[in-house]
Image: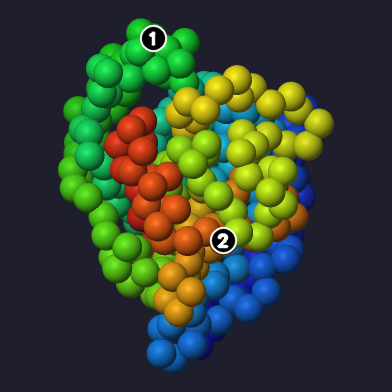
Amino acid sequence: MILKPTRPRFTPRTPGTQTTVSNEPCTGSYASSSGDHVQLKVPLIQQSYHWDCGLACARMVLQYLNLLNEEEFQNAMQELQLTKSIWTIDLAYLMHHFAVQHQFCTQTLGVDKGYKNQSFYRKHFDAEENRVNQLFAQAKAHGVNVEKRSVTIQELQDHLSKGHVAIVLVNAVLLLCDLCPSRVKYCCFLPIGQKCFCKSIEYQGHFIVLCGYNKSSESLFYNNPGYADRLCRTSITNFEEARSSYGTDEDILFIYVDS
């Protein structure tokens, strides 16, 4: 059963941006009839800076849905006033802008005040707290679907089995790819040539696109916007640890292909 065809390579870019797009090497984009294995061909789009992993994930999803138009994407960023501080609620509003059916599940409806003491959030916390809380408060009125609840692995697998994808917030320090060399397992997922900003083993928020699973090996497949040349895989146990780490709020943005 073919779940999603490969999308054409997207080339137009706004001058000065560095995003890299690739459809490689995501082989085997089929699901067995038993549902044991699903691997969706979600195009790989690399982030350009340390702060835009969420936007790169949004681009991957939109291209997967054949909705990516860079001019419109830039207009949406301006309209939504997206800056260098991107929260999951921002991505939900971005999906709504493109009329993409979505569901944002989180454990915290707003900003956890405890994050003010975390180095990852500290720099932008005071400026962002009111903005983000307002987005949550106004979400329903704007047609942005937000729900406070946990998500199970079974629910994620069922979602993927239908050809849908999900953007997930994880702690990059904890997420381990089984397919990447050990020397990059603790990398902060920056494009090649950019200096790593990780100074300790503290929380480092990072968005990924979940795009498959294998029940036999108890693993999940995902696109890491830090790379433009590889599909990543991790164990369910490691994924659960990385996505439930304090700082993530267990944020998951479900994306539906029938948008």
Label 1: how many residues lie within 10 Å, few (<14), some (14-19) or many (20+)? few
Q: Nearer the viewer, residue 194 or 109?
A: 194
Tell me the residue at 19%/28% (across/down): 137
In this rendering, the answer to whether 10 lies above or below 194 is: below
Quarter of the picture containing the C terminus is bottom left
In this rendering, the answer to whether 175 lies above or below 190 is: below
User: Which-is-in-front pick, marks 1 and 2?
Assistant: 2
- Whether residue 97 is visible, yes or no, is no
In this rendering, the answer to whether 27 lies above or below 234 is: below
User: Is the C-beta separation of discs 1 and 2 under 8 Å?
Assistant: no
Label 2: how many residues lie within 10 Å, few (<14), some (14-19) or many (20+)? many
Tell me the residue at 54%/72% (across/down): 39
Q: Position of residue 9 (x, y in %)?
A: 73, 59
Residue type for callout 2 = Arg
Q: Position of residue 94 (x, y in %)?
A: 43, 40
Q: Nearer the viewer, residue 227 or 217?
A: 217
Q: Which residue is mark 2?
A: 233
Kindly report the distance in space between the C-alpha atoms of the residues bearing marks 1 and 2: 36 Å
- Whether residue 20 is visible, yes or no, is yes
Tell me the residue at 26%/23% (across/down): 112
Residue type for callout 1 = Ala
**Does 114 sit left or right of 194 as displayed?**
left
Q: Position of residue 172 (x, y in %)?
A: 52, 38
Give the residue at the far bottom of this rendering. Answer: 33
Say which mark, if any, is on residue 25: none
Q: Secondary structure at mark 1?
A: helix
Image quadrant assignment for residue 28: bottom right
Q: Secondary structure at mark 2?
A: strand
Q: Position of residue 17 (x, y in %)?
A: 74, 32
Q: Which residue is mark 1?
A: 127
Tell me the residue at 27%/23% (across/down): 111
**Does 107 sit left or right of 224 as displayed?**
left
